[in-house]
Image (tube, grey):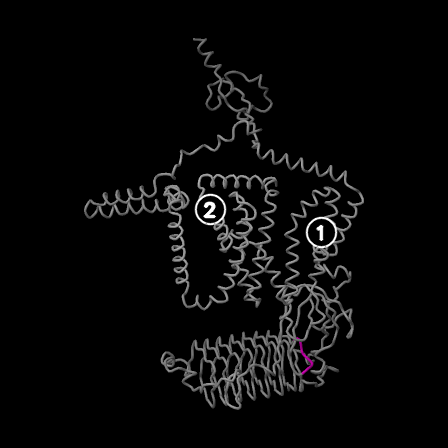
Amino acid sequence: MPDKEQTETDKTTDVPKEAVREPAGTPESKVTEGVQDSLPGLEPGEHPRERRLRQEEVLVRVRRRDRDEIDLVVDAFWVFIDKVRNASRPYLALGVLLVLLGLSLAGWPQGFVGESQGGYWSLRGADQSSLARYTTEGDYVEFTPGEKVTVEGVIDGMEYYGPLETLPLPLLEPEPQSSEGEALRNGTSDVLFPPLQQIFAQGAAANYSNTLTLERYHFPELEVDGFLFNDVIFREVVFEDVTFRGGFFINCRFEQVAFYNVTLVDTVISHGEFEDVLFQSSSLERGRLEHSEMRSVLLRESEWRDSVLVQSELHGVKWDGSWLTNVTLQKSTMRAVVFQELSTVNVTLVNSRVEYVVDGEDLDYTYLELRGTTLRLPGDVALRYPIGASIYLEAIVVVEGNSSGQVQDGSWVSGTITGEGFSTPHTEHPMTFEYELLTSRVSEIQPTFWWSLGFHMLTGLGLWVLVFAIGGEAVLLALLKFFAPFFATLAGFLVMFLTIPTRDFLLVSQLMFLYFVPPFGKGTVIPLGIAAGVNPWVLAAATAFVDIMVGIFLAWNFDLARRIPFVGGAIRRAQAKGHEILEQRPWVGRIAFVGILLFVMFPFQGSGSVGGTLLGRAMGMEIYPILGAVTIGGVLGSVIIAASVVFGLGLAGKMGTYGLLIALLLVMILVTIIYIFSHWDELSLDEFQDVLGLHREGFIGAQVGAAADFAGAATSGVFRAVGETGQVISKTTATVLDAFMPEGGPGEEAPIDETKDESEDDLEN
């Protein structure tokens, strides 16, 4: 018995060391048997056994293929270091000097620190920061009138204001006619307010008009009381001797409209748009113009009285022999204004501005926003240069707005603005419209494109010198082949510059660079350029040129790309897969040229010259067949898209979306049928199923099979409920599908464990 008790007492249990807590100050050797309390899971007097925590060893496995890629990069780096050490010191110094000089003049260091003064401006080395510093009077701090200033930068904004005296307006004499000479129709109250709409408006406004387009009408001698126009478009309309009293114009648009002797009393115009509008001997009394925009408006011998303008914009306005009496502008703007004998009484600007006051009789100016300042140029510069173009020019500081009048001793001295002038609330001092402005001529504008190009070519020359110093003639010739498409691209830019207008050249250049940015393609770039006014055939030629150059670059340098670490491995595997496809299905090689052509021609995501060239080389095609397919596909695709935009809009409007889709589907079916019958002897059902993915595991067959199983189960349940015949139908369906799409692909073998390829010899710790 004692031996048994001793054996039970000496039993040990596997417990972590940190789970045992000894009393403070009690050595482990002095714990008395029988006095110690038992631990959970232990008998009294039983001691826990200490266990060392397990330390797991983590093995990092790297495939031999990846290790070889890493070793290749490291070896190439040290080879490059050795070449640099053995290179000619004079050539190295000259190359570094040219590179640094070219980058500095091109503006790279300035751009790195947030400055945009590159290109031509870097060569001059001047400072333009003072151009954006105005005084409260709108003057430049460091420039005086008559001083010349060189301005360079990117066009941030541009707005053209055409002459107002020659607006394309409908006329009254010799007879009411449109601006194109077409006779205007006689307008009546029933035309303004259709009887059917009056029925729906019972109990509301006495005169109601909604969602109408009134075009080429002459409305004479009308009295309209209590009216509501909502979403009405007035286009080439003349109102003569008409009075509108107590009504609303809501969301209405006035295009080429002339008001002759028209009175608007107690009228609210909300969210209205006025463009090319004449007010002749007309008046707005107790009116309210809110959230509206007036552009190219001529007011002649007209008056606004006791009226308010709230959050409205008046751009390109001429006040000729008119009156403003008790008028308030709240959070509104007048821009590009011509004052010709404007009489003012109590005109107040509340958080409002009057900008670009012109000392002259009419407008015909473009205002450019360039480097934080405003330049005024005569004519429509938008026809020559787009927004975003980088330009430089010589400008002169002039004073504008002084002929409208001046403030002297706190009072208004009349100029073209008579009376009290414009003032702000809570002040007795009127406002002055005199300000300093930079002006220039269109002939002074020069694009910085060629300067920037020259500085970048200087950088490229420095790189060539470095390459020659390090690698010698062999590497230089290899790089010449590499950069030959880029040189051809520069030649293409030069041809465009010499053959098309500067504005179109800058737009096409931007679109050609945009062509490289996913997801943009020729299907996006060509319509955008046509919408901007560029010749569609120029756009088609430019996008086709890009496809050809990219195809040449990739085709000539495909072998070089195969040697690039981490990228070349994927290309080599894709090429091996292409060879495998050609060996198993030789007929694919016979249609590869046509397939690449169609792949480049259609503007799908991932298609184009890049995808077509890589696909052709992966399939084992030679260089020149690939270039031929890419060239033909690029040209056809660009021309088809341009032609579809130019000629196909009318047809698309007639056919609609569904009509176009049906027509495209029919064409695809017809082409497929023709191809199958012409290659009937060369095709087999197994290859047809495998290529199209019709087998059970294919991308089409899997979906059809799942749908068939679901349909079979549903059909079985329904027919079983009505007559126990669903099982027969379900089996019949499955039999047919199995015959057409057998389990697995044709000739498909059991799945192979891919991990077996990576043997222990191919893995390292």
* In-image side of 141 versus 159 (left or right): right
* Mark with earlier residue (2, 1): 1
- Furthest-right residue in this view: 90
The x and y percentages for residue 100 are: 75, 51
* In-image side of 88 versus 424 (left or right): right
- Amino acid tagged 1: Gly
How crowded is the residue under tag 2: few (<14 C-alpha within 10 Å), some, or many (20+)?
few
* In-image side of 22 versus 77 (left or right): left
Say the numbered circle drawn on residue 470: none
Look at mark 2 in the image and give the residue it sits on. Answer: 590
> What is the quadrant of the N terminus in the image?
top left
**SS of the residue at dot 2?**
helix
The x and y percentages for residue 750 are: 40, 33
Q: Quadrant of residue 390?
A: bottom right
User: What residue do we see at 66% from left, 70% from top?
Assistant: 368
Q: Are dots 2 and 1 in contact, CB under 8 Å?
A: no
Distance Cα–Cα, label 2 vs label 1: 43 Å
Q: Nearer the viewer, mark 2 or mark 1?
A: 2
Q: Which residues are magenta?
A: 355-360
User: What residue do we see at 54% from left, 85% from top?
Assistant: 285
Is 357 covered by the magenta stretch?
yes
